[in-house]
Amino acid sequence: MIKYLKNPYILIGLGGIAFWLYSRKNIVKSKANTVSKQIKELKDNSEIPEDFKKDVDTMTTEEIVSTIEHNVRMLDRADIKDKSKKLEMERMLEYLTDEYDKRISKK
């Protein structure tokens, strides 16, 4: 066993494997941080247009429910290639559901 530890190729290989494991751990950590940042961005309503917010404020609860149902069906059916448009629509849908939850909790 000791004769294998004296071989420089085995030592270089072990060092490479150790470096790979160390860097892999760092990559996994950075991906987890990136995912948590993306989730926070989804919750952020600052990028929703003010016109949309005003329209939602004027809607009744029934209109909000029908809009949510319609938008969910539309997102399921539509083949949206542009990820930014799909993300924007999901944010608007999230805002609608949050607004609906607020109105229901007030009753």
Image: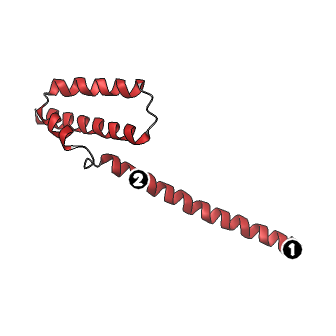
Nearest to N terminus: mark 2 or mark 1: 1
- Mark 1 sits on what residue? 7
Q: Amino acid at mark 1?
A: Asn
Q: Where is residue 5? Give x, y as percent.
A: 83, 73
- Single out the mark in the foreground, 2 or 1: 2
Vertical side of 89 occupied by 1: above or below: below
Please identify the quadrant where the N terminus is shown: bottom right
Q: Is residue 85 visible?
A: yes
The picture quadrant where one finds residue 77 is top left
- For the residues labelled 2 and 1, say whether their Cβ atoms are less than 8 Å apart: no
Please identify the quadrant where the C terminus is shown: top left
- SS at badge 1: loop
Residue placed at 23% from the left, 38% from the top? 98
- Mark 2 sits on what residue? 36
In the displayed structure, does residue 34 sit left or right of residue 71?
right
Query: Mark 1: few, some, or many residues within 10 Å (few <14, many ≥20)?
Result: few
